[in-house]
Amino acid sequence: MPLDLTHDPDLRCWVESAGHEETDFPIQNLPFAVFTPAAGGDPRVGIGIGSEVLDLRAASATGLLERAATDDITRRHLADTLADACRSPSLDALLALGRVPARMLRHALSSLLRADTTVGRDAAAMADQLLFSLDGVHLGLPAHIGDYTDFYASVHHATNVGSMFRPDNPLLPNYKWVPIGYHGRASTIVPSGTPVRRPRGQTRDGDAPPEFGPSRRLDYELEVGAVVCGGIDAPIELPRAEEHLYGLCLVNDWSARDIQAWEYQPLGPFLAKSFATSVSPWIVTLDALEPFRTAAYTRPEGDPAPLPYLSDPDDAQRGGFRITLEVWLASARMRERGEAPMRVSEGAFEGMYWTLGQMLTHHASNGCVLRPGDLIASGTVSGVAKESRGCLLERTWKGTEPLTLSGGETRRFLEDGDEVILRGRARAPGATPIGFGECRGIVLPAS
């Protein structure tokens, strides 16, 4: 999709906080979430703008959204199917409609929030009916997530982990041929801010018999998630794959490394992964991310070319995204002392070996049918430098190189009371930076 007026860095919004330089949600972003007013009421769909959230239900009920339509086709949709979806208590209805209606809605919202349009000035006069402060709402899961699939798309992460356990052969023979993934547990996906309880499971130390108890090697994983949309018939050809991706969010795929090491043989992730996965509440649309497109990962000389069904010139040229990802950590002691969280990792999403389009295409290539609201995640995002490793397993090299926190504490793996905070921000020359909000979770003791 070419850049359009909604990406113009000169756009100005009548919501004052949307113009702050460090905001994640300028008018060029317009991410979707589901919120409930803290004072009470039903869940509803909202749009992040500065430090506020725009109530789509109210914007539709007042007729402002329909007035903000930029063409007759959009106006008809906003009076009919889009209006119904905007009044829904979740994003399910919008996700079912797909990318094209989402783009229509984005254009109308941009017009409604601009300071220099007639409908924008009228909306500003009704701000008390349209806006809620982010401090005064509860943000939940954006949609019903029926299925969740986690990939392993960072070659740096795969190489690092492989080096710990197979120093002579870090990457398995299939890695550079096929996007590796596993089916996760959708029932334990939780929104940002939900505490995560330390899981129990079987672990084994050396040749001793296995024991059952709390994990002693709890870890986070810094990931990007993509939310599926539209009517989907499998298989999906790669040139059309992104038509079925609504937008991106942040994902923390919590992992119990000691449980994982024992149960991983011979199948894959099970109890070590299924206890919790945290997701950020905001879905940043692929349309909003258009200015941050970049080429897919350049495969080193000697690596095999993707098989034909995973090859597409456009995907190779623009299938990556310039997104900087960060992990911050705050221990219970740091919070008690009023100390700020410490950044422990910074990585780049553009370095993934497989694109999101390739992941989706491979997922559906065997006839697997995906549904609107399904979540696919990238797997841990890691880079070459130590500071870009996206989990503690890598950051502390399996616990042998402890991480020293700002207050002097050390960490090999997560301890009870630790809070993990994920952040993401897209940047590119000539474009207004946009962000993803936060994905937070505090570790509670095992029950």
Image (cartoon, helix red, strand yellow):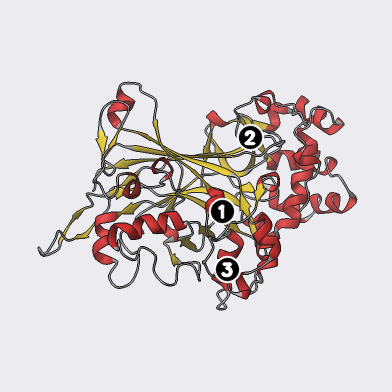
Question: How busy is the neighbourhood of tag 2: few (under 14 within 10 Å), some, or many (20 plus)?
Answer: many
Q: Position of residue 382 (x, y in %)?
A: 44, 49
Tell me whether the residue at label 2 lies in contact with that at label 3, contact meaning CB atoms closer than 8 angstroms: no
Marks 2/1: CA distance? 20 Å
Tell me whether the residue at label 2 lies in contact with that at label 1, contact meaning CB atoms closer than 8 angstroms: no
Marks 2/3: CA distance? 29 Å
- Kindly state the secondary structure of the residue where label 2 is placed: loop
State the residue position of label 1: 143
Q: Position of residue 139 (x, y in %)?
A: 52, 40
State the residue position of label 3: 370
- Kindly state the secondary structure of the residue where label 1 is placed: loop
- At 53% across and 51% down in the image, what residue appears? 351
Q: Nearer the viewer, mark 2 or mark 1?
A: 2
Amino acid type at image mark 3: Leu
Q: Is residue 274 above or below residue 415?
A: below
Viewer-proximal residue, 379 or 202?
A: 379
Drawn side of residue 185 relative to residue 402, left or right: right
Q: Nearer the viewer, mark 3 or mark 1?
A: 3
Mark found first going from the N terminus, 2 or 1: 2
Drawn side of residue 361 relative to residue 10, left or right: left
State the residue position of label 2: 25
Q: Is residue 82 above or below residue 66?
A: below
Name the disc covering residue 58, or none: none
